[in-house]
Amino acid sequence: MNLIQNWVETPAATALGWTLIHSLWEGAVVALLLAAALCVLRGARARYAAGCLALLVLLAGFGFTFARLLAAQGSLDAATRIGPLRFAPLDADAGSLSAMRSAGGLAEYLPWIAPFWVAGVLIFHLRSLMGWLGARRLRRTGVCCAPAMWQQMLERLAARLRISRPVTLWESCLADVPLVIGFLRPVILIPVGMLAGVPAAQVEALLLHELAHIRRHDYLVNLLQVFVEGLLFYHPAVWWMASAIRAEREHCCDDLVVATQGDAYLYASALAALEHNRGDARQPALAANGGSLVKRIRRLLIQPETSRSGLAPVLSAAILTVTVAAALAAWQTKPPAPPAPPAPAPAESPAPPPLPPAPPAPAPAEAPAPPPPVETPYAKWVKEDVAYIITDAERAAFKRLPTDEEREHFIEQFWQRRDPTPGTPVNEFKAEHYRRIAYANNNFSSSIAGWKTDRGRVYITYGPSDEKETHPTGGSSYSYPYEQWMYHFIDGVGKNIIVEFVDPDRTGEYRMTSDPNAALVTLPASSVTGVTAVQVLGGKAMISILPRGSQRLIILGRILNKEGAQVTAFEDTAQGPQQYVKSVPLSLGEYRLVTVVKDLATGRSSETTTSFSVK
């Protein structure tokens, strides 16, 4: 205890305490600049370089601040030891004694921050050292040389990447995923059985990823990064910067693999096979499954997420505000200034005339509406990607999940349950589903995305039709453009199902109806109802009403069973000539739909009856 007390009383402890205080706002400023750079930069290499530069600037700022404060503290300490003693009189009225105590309070306790910081640095570096020793143990325990053919493949891949150092490939009983250990003599560890159980092309992609780490000297950079993290462990901005650096490091290696191999889908499939073996992101060894695997796969197959750094400026600004306020509050309080002498009383003068009343203040401008919330990738997945194939129970279960990890696990299980060939690296159902979405967006888009249209929904749900008739001009001058799709068999629906789509507005947006008369041009008449049709899909009656004109309508509907008893009823409003669609779940049986459509402007109404069956 005496040793710590003696060290706390040294100028170095005081300088270190002030350095830690200043590093708070310094780190916040650097994080804010990095966040702004990440918003502008799009290339992974540029973003990675910006993150590393920010971490080095923060480390250099810490050292420069400490050196400057240590020199200033040493000069102050020397002046205190040899300078003449001068006593200033105390002003009892100004409360000088309490001011002196408050001014010297922080300086008195600030040096005690230093030993706690040293203890934290030792703990974090000890943790990193244990991780490094564990990685070294993987290199010596439970390993064997990979077959010669794989070692030769590794040498060919290393030559393609222009790596001059010899790289060894070993199979490991302890490694769960491929990883690289070492800098001078790097070793790539592959889980036992992976070379035999994974397609050779995917193994080649994973080896290219590890070789990319070696070519970029990521092992050494990662060790230096862990050292800086341990030194500045107390700063949240450092952890955010370190996380961004690790993510961009993996993106750089992913881009190098795709540029070398040329098949992003194959590499994404290889990464997906490693998802269940995800490990700690702060490990000294570099693994192929580092970072958020789902985000990396989405980045390879679709596009990088534009919102991934959207919160970074806000977070950095919040850190900057809080830390600057704390630094200003922690600064030594200046002693209060002596009170000013009282001003002489002014001579009496006649009262001035009253001023005219001020004009009323203008009404404050209305605050702008808050921006709409940013939709997360998980919300987009359930609302768009699988909107037509997810069950109600699955949708409700997904919405109850509290964390992203649970949502990613749910998505993985969702596709595994539908995989027709479990155990294979490719999920045919998933690949076909996303192919259908892409086809719908490319071929059925109009004013809305193709997957949202009626044709897109049917195509995504049931796939390509067995037979198809297309009449883009309607076939004659008295017909709307229409298409007829025929499915020979739909499981759960029936055989020889004909689905018809018409384009009543001639805008390219086809709407589904099964009534052949829906393709006829609707001529002006007293009736306000154009076409009423019912299509049964998967135990649901899809009611489609295409009104005439552009009036506002009220739609009343009743569904009766075979005995004439009412099963359900509905009431809605619609705007012509837009198509009105209603989905009603029904059990098996014969039904009649009675609809009444009333024009709210003219009061005219019409009634139609349509018979249908649910099989």
Image: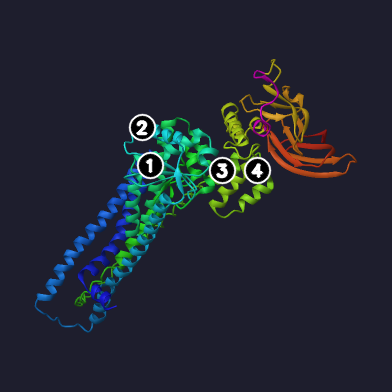
Identify the residue at the far right of this view.
563
Q: Nearer the viewer, mark 4 or mark 3?
A: 4
Q: Can residue 600 be seen in this view?
A: no
Q: What element carries label 1?
A: helix
Q: How far apart are marks 3 and 2 (CA)?
A: 42 Å
Q: Answer few, some or many: residues within 10 Å of disc 4's Cα (few below 14, many 20 plus, some between 14 and 19).
A: few
Q: How far apart are marks 2 and 4 (CA)?
A: 42 Å
Q: Is residue 574 magenta?
A: no
Q: Nearer the viewer, mark 3 or mark 2?
A: 2
Query: Pointer 3: what residue?
Result: 380
Q: Which of marks 2 and 4 is in front?
A: 2
Q: How far apart are marks 3 and 1 (CA)?
A: 33 Å
Q: Is mark 4 on a helix, strand or loop?
A: helix
The residue nearer to you, when weighing 528 against 112, is 112
Relative side of 285 to 556, left or right: left
Callout 1, which amino acid? His
| Image label count | 4
Q: Residue 417 carries which label?
A: 4
Q: Which mark is residue 159?
A: 2
Query: Pointer 1: what residue?
Result: 213
